């Protein structure tokens, strides 16, 4: 039946119309789909356990070489140029490539084929499976009734379906019929496209072998004795005599041969999962060889996501290593993308940064889909850099300095001081936060903290020394104790002191130690003035006023997510007279030398600043800092400076 005749026969629309996509030799197609370099070679797929392996599937090139399903491994190897039984080259082309059957590759290929079919109809039923013992074909039957307005006549839909499957790496046959079983059996017997017109089903099936009915050996032998070899011959037999001799099943066989069998359609749900799997013939040790296959897998993932107007938000690679080990890595671009070269470059940098410790025998890629990002550019606004450039730059930085040193800091849900972690950059697409205009005090952390030697007097730190200088502590407020995670190796138990220290040799004779406003139990509160605050005529807080403390308890910080910026004491808690007097007052620094009273606006940006560098470079001998006593290790360290 020609395509034109099939198109004219379905012009009026049919209540039932099915299209069957049949992929023969599916184990071989699943392995060759991602290996384009093997598609020009004769390939056979072996099933079973050694030494009883046998050929379960092969491509057309291997079939032309004389290979056949059911051959043993030894027979297949004997066809190669260097056979253990026959030495010398084999005339007729390259050697057979023997591959091991992979259930994971077939499962991933089946999901891809189902996604391709789902683009043409939401009602799909599986008509053939490539599971061991049930054949080597994978087939799906689509209910295409009423799709003429979307995809045109049935012949045109079949052509587009075949092209879609070919783009995904499958060689499939398509058959269209108003009968479910007729479309299935015809698709398994032809190569290409067959459109069966209404009323011509028996004629289209007449030349098919009776093996298309998948009969038991007993019944197949009986029909062979009768001389019945095709479906046309079976359909010509009288129904009553056939049922009397073969039983009730014969009525179903005759209806199938005539294209009149009834069928209850059982659609399946196509689950959308972006996964690709490839198993290598030999262990792969070179990253370039691994990325050669990974490029094809990424291309398939991007094509599948783009077919649903989606992009790849993340990509996870899981590698099976030689010796039953595994190695994994993941990439997450700042914005979802469908740029194949960009994703491949990120994967190359990630694998180069965290290489597998052994040869790779299989590779699995799993992607998470996300909405495609769209950026609206202004007419007069300058063009912003591509997000892919930032991701590639960050990947190269991670390769040089490590993952824990590149990213965006995120506070952890803990009371531990300086508790944070680094996470990758990601564009959330939210509105920009409003910038605060109020001045805030700066707390400059010393990373890593500097170890110091502290002299304690009356349960308070009095003097501390680093490797270069000694500092007298003029004022010390604390301690503020924090502890946690006592059950883990990362447990901590610390005391924190806010201190104002003066270099010992720089303290002028007769000068009083500078102090900060607040009660003895209040934490040190630096003012935005450049010099320490010396109380004048304000001696104490008003009645009922409480000292400012930014921590709720002795064992937990408040809020738990980190530091609260500290500013000058809130004068609202003072009485009106004292509050106005405080606002008009100015620190009196006459008791200090000019060198001590001057505070530099400059800060030390070194990751390990020296105390003398932070003071001498700015001609200042006074520092406000944070000393921490690690009670578990009985060690003191300087962790921060106040500006």
Image (tube, rainbow, N blue to C red):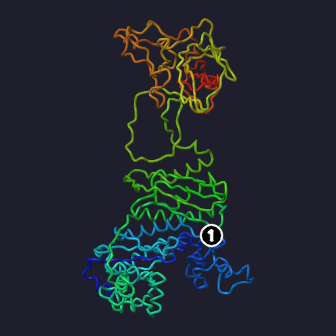
The 10 Å Cα crowd at callout 1, few under 14, some 14 to 19, many 20 or more, is few
Camera-nearest residue between 256 and 556: 256
- Of 290 and 381, nearer the camera is 290
Q: Left or right of 82: which side holds 233? A: left
Against 417, residue 77 (above or below) is below
- Residue in the picture at 35% in, 68% down: 267
Q: Position of residue 564 (x, y in %)?
A: 46, 27
Indicate left or right for 61 with 178 as reference: right
Residue 272, by quadrant, is bottom left
Q: Quadrant of residue 198?
A: bottom left
Q: Position of residue 515 (x, y in %)?
A: 52, 12
Element on which disc 1 rests: loop
Q: Quadrant of the N terminus?
A: bottom left
The residue under the point 72% across, 84% down is 89
Image x and y of residue 476, in percent: 55, 15
* Residue that numbered label 1 is attached to: 49
Residue 385 % position (x, y): 48, 52
């Amino acid at each position: 039946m020609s395509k034109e005749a099939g198109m004219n026969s379905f012009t009026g629309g049919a209540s039932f119309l099915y299209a069957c996509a049949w992929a023969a030799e599916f184990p071989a197609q699943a392995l060759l789909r991602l290996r384009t370099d093997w598609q020009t070679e004769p390939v056979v797929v072996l099933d079973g356990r050694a030494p009883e392996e046998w050929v379960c599937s092969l491509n057309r090139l291997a079939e032309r070489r004389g290979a056949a399903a059911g051959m043993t491994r030894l027979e297949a190897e004997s066809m190669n140029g260097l056979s253990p039984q026959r030495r010398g080259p084999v005339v007729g082309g390259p050697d057979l490539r023997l591959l091991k059957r992979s259930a994971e590759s077939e499962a991933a290929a089946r999901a891809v084929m189902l996604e391709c079919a789902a683009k043409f109809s939401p009602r799909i039923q599986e008509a053939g499976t490539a599971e061991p013992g049930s054949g080597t074909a994978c087939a799906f039957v689509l209910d295409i009734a009423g799709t003429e307005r979307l995809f045109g006549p049935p012949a045109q839909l079949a052509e587009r379906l075949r092209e879609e499957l070919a783009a995904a790496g499958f060689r499939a046959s398509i058959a269209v019929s108003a009968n479910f079983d007729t479309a299935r059996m015809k698709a398994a017997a032809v190569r290409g496209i067959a459109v069966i017109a209404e009323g011509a089903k028996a004629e289209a099936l007449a030349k098919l072998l009776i093996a298309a009915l998948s009969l038991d050996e007993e019944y197949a032998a009986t029909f062979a004795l009768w001389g019945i070899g095709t479906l046309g011959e079976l359909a010509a037999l009288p129904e009553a005599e056939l049922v009397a001799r073969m039983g009730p099943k014969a009525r179903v066989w005759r209806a199938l041969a005539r294209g009149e069998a009834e069928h209850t359609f059982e659609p399946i749900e196509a689950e959308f999962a972006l996964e690709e799997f490839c198993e290598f013939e030999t262990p792969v040790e070179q990253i370039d060889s691994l990325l050669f296959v990974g490029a094809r897998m990424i291309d398939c993932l991007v094509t599948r996501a783009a077919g649903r107007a989606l992009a790849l938000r993340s990509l996870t690679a899981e590698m099976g290593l030689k010796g039953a080990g595994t190695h994994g890595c993941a990439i997450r671009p700042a914005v979802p993308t469908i740029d194949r070269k960009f994703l491949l470059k990120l994967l190359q940098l990630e694998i180069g940064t965290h290489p597998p410790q052994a040869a790779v025998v299989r590779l699995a890629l799993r992607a998470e889909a996300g909405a495609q990002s769209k950026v609206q550019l202004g007419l007069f606004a300058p063009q912003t850099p591509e997000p892919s450039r930032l991701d590639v730059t960050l990947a190269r930085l991670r390769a040089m300095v490590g993952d824990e040193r590149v990213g965006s800091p995120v506070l952890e849900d803990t009371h531990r001081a300086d508790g944070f972690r680094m996470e990758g950059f990601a564009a959330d697409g939210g509105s920009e936060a409003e910038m605060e205009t109020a001045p805030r005090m700066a707390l400059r952390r010393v990373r890593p903290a500097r170890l110091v030697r502290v002299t304690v007097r009356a349960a308070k730190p009095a003097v501390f020394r680093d490797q270069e200088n000694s500092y007298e502590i003029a004022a010390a407020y604390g301690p503020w104790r924090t502890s946690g995670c006592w059950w883990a190796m990362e447990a901590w138990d610390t005391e924190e002191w806010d201190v104002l220290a003066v270099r010992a040799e720089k303290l002028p004779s007769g000068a009083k130690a500078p102090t900060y406003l607040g009660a003895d139990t209040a934490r040190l509160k630096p003012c935005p003035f450049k010099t320490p605050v010396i109380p004048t005529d304000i001696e104490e807080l008003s009645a009922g006023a409480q000292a400012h403390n930014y921590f709720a308890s002795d064992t937990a910080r408040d809020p738990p997510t980190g530091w609260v910026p500290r500013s000058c004491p809130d004068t609202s808690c003072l009485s009106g007279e004292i509050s106005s007097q405080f606002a008009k007052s100015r620190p009196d620094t006459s008791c200090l030398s000019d060198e001590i009273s001057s505070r530099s606006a400059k800060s030390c940006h070194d990751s390990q600043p020296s105390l003398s560098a932070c003071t001498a470079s700015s001609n200042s001998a006074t520092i406000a800092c944070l000393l921490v006593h690690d009670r578990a290790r009985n060690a003191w360290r300087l962790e921060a400076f106040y500006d």
